[in-house]
Image (spheres, grey):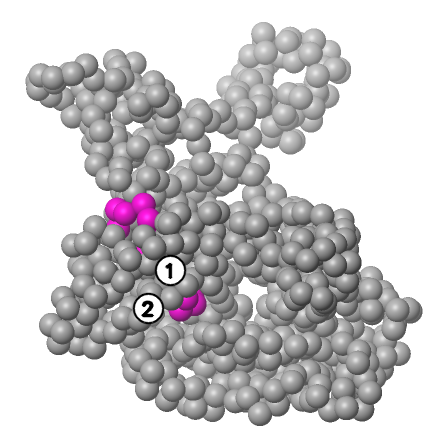
Amino acid sequence: MLVAEICINLTAKNILQSYTYAVPEKFNFLEKGWRVIVPFGKQIVDGFIMEVKNTDENFDFELKEIKDVVDEEIWFTPQMSKMASWIADFYLCPLSQAMALFMAGNHSKKTTPKFEFIIKPAENFSEVKLTKTQENFLQNLRERGEIPLKEIKNRSSIIKTLLEKKLIVKESRRILRDSYANVEIVQKEIKLTDEQKKAVDTVQLFLKMKMHAGFLLHGVTGSGKTQVYIELTKIVRQLGRRALILVPEISLTGQIVKSFKAYFPDVLVIHSKLSINERNDIFYKIRKGEVGIVIGARSAIFTPLDDVGLIVIDEEQDSSYKQDAPPFYHAKIIAEEFAKIQKAAIIFGSATPSFETFYRAKIGKLGYLQLSHRISNNPLPEVELVDMRAELKAGNKSVLSSALKNLLQETLENQQQAILLLNARGYSTFIMCRDCGKVICCPECGISMHYHITDKTLKCHHCEIEQTPPTICPKCGSKRIKYFGTGTQKLEEYLKLELPAAKILRMDRDTTTKKFAHDEILESFKRGEFDILFGTKMVAKGHDIPNVTAVGILSADSVLNFPDFRAAEQCFELITQAAGRAGRGDLPGKVIVQTYNTDADAVKFAVAQDFKAFYNVEIVKREFLFFPPFSRLVKLIFADKKKEKALDAAERIVNSFKLEVVKNSEVRQEIFGPIPAVIENLRGEFRFAVLIKTSDLEIVRGFLRLHNLHISPNVQIDFDPLTTN
């Protein structure tokens, strides 16, 4: 009897083993890697075949049969299965949860590819007598090579005759959708700088030897990191290997896709805004060997790309590479493991590298490649710091300082463009009762809700729950409801009032919900249709718009108010990246940084655009406090409907860790908590956070396994979390 061991595609933590199913005769072609549809309890679900075997074993129960297959071919390649197993082991998650990452979307139904009919000239044919119309049609077909049948429905009689005379053939062909197929491209003559050449020469040694190696490409904004990626990709493709280019945000894919498509015909793009059908088509083309380069956000690491010689992590410091749902993976960590398996070079590129990556380069665990100057030696923009406390004393209560308002007016007069960064969506950042102090919060997570004037709703930016703003306080009944803070929508209203002649364009999550909204906004701005582009931090990353000479950064120091060890690093990164949008063309740039904390190291060094000086000051604090890069972090969230149960479970684990690990470990281990989580009550469950700092992640992983925390439904495990509570 033919049976299959199947991993069920359900992410419940207690489903750890595979299940045995009978393989019907019609599916005797199945092998490891196929996705199939099976009954599981009262459900019909999909699963992944781990093994197929013949057996004479007599089972004590009747085996259920495989109902159907999901795809037209094997889905999981050997390397995908290997990576899924590694992810499950590293992140202590069910194998099904790890394997689900490699799917183009959540499937519980059989997928059906889309096909079309085409006609082509027959390869071998004899001369036969044709009418003039038939001869003209056949000549046109031979010139084009093939024609989709749907284009020539009105020629059915001609087609029928030519088919009967065996002068043409009709074939079925799969329709492969590609949203980026018609991207407008312009190839420029590029002369590499000496630093770019040095970077390419250093990495290509490892590419040609097919050896794994890791590098940090540390380049100031506008220094030509993308061109280094392209030159290395040229080498990889000449060697017959493939390249994987990761970017943190969908908003960055359009620009880098254009850059690569100018040099390579076999580029495909994948990200979360694509439909499931588009993703399936991309996977199909990759499997057929029609793709040499994949570009995308973090999910692109899960495509079935093999024989990869180069992996690029652009803007490697960006928090978007971290998944915020189980299994809480970090794409950088998975990409590096993938690079080892593939014997590939991996490049971490950034103007403001993460402290962890820069430290690894400092101690020699990564090669260090530096681009210290902008292309054509264009100067970095002039940066001016404005103390908003002084503005208030001078009577300016506006969100724009006098210096920034003057800069914007001057920019408009010179017919140049400006970018403004405000790290807050919506109209007002919160709504509060002025009598009792009640802040209107999300009913699910307790975080303050933001007011959006466009649809006059309150929205939770964590849960995306919406509700109508109250007219009276739900706590005390007062009508003295006030809207506090400034979001992007409120800034838009203010700019229209203060600069009525300016054509302004907003870019945030509310204006970029459509698939190509990011590209459309940036392209219209680049064409000069708007004077000012403003929005959240997505306007600060990667955009290269030559006519932008002015940048304003509002509330630059707001992130410093968060109780997180990375706050200063994030503040420095935000200011530096945003400032880097100015002066990238032939015209010099000017940047205004508005802050209430002019003495903060992150602000001072960002204004000076001196990463290394900032790093040297901040790294001393990190080492003293045993934070990354000197430790690895593991965050545990204990949740329960009963507050006492969640707290008790957390306290027991903390005490056990101190007794079993801290006392007996030869390396430094620390544990803190429990403390209420940032979102203390989520959907009716109380949550407590525990933080572990460790010099040996495997010891901690062993402790978590021993106490079965990895299979507990009430515990979340987050390796390398971005925040500490």
Circle 2: is it few (<14), some (14-19), or many (20+) Cα within 10 Å? some
Which sits in the foreground, 382 or 144?
382
- Position of 6 with respect to 618 (left or right) is left
The structure residue drawn at horizontal position 77% and vertical position 91%, both measured from the top left corner, is 393
Q: Is 559 included in the stretch rendered in magenta?
A: no
Q: Position of residue 350 (x, y in %)?
A: 49, 73
Which sits in the foreground, 120 or 456?
456
Q: Position of residue 195 (x, y in %)?
A: 48, 82
Quarter of the image containing the C terminus? bottom left
Judging from the image, what secondary structure is the residue with disc 2 in? Answer: strand
Quarter of the image for residue 707 reads bottom left
* Residue assigned mark 2: 673
Quarter of the image containing the N terminus? top left
How many marks overall?
2
The structure residue drawn at horizontal position 86% and vertical position 79%, both measured from the top left corner, is 409
Q: Are marks 1 and 2 in contact (CB under 8 Å)?
A: yes
Q: Is residue 548 visible?
A: yes
Which sits in the foreground, 691 or 548?
691
Q: Is residue 364 above or below residue 236?
A: below
Residue span colored magenta = 710-725
Specify the amino acid type for callout 1. Answer: Phe
Q: Residue furthest right?
A: 501
* Residue assigned mark 1: 688
Q: Position of residue 692 (x, y in %)?
A: 29, 68
Q: Position of residue 334 (x, y in %)?
A: 34, 57
The structure residue drawn at horizontal position 77% and vertical position 62%, both measured from the top left corner, is 480
Specify the amino acid type for callout 2. Answer: Gly
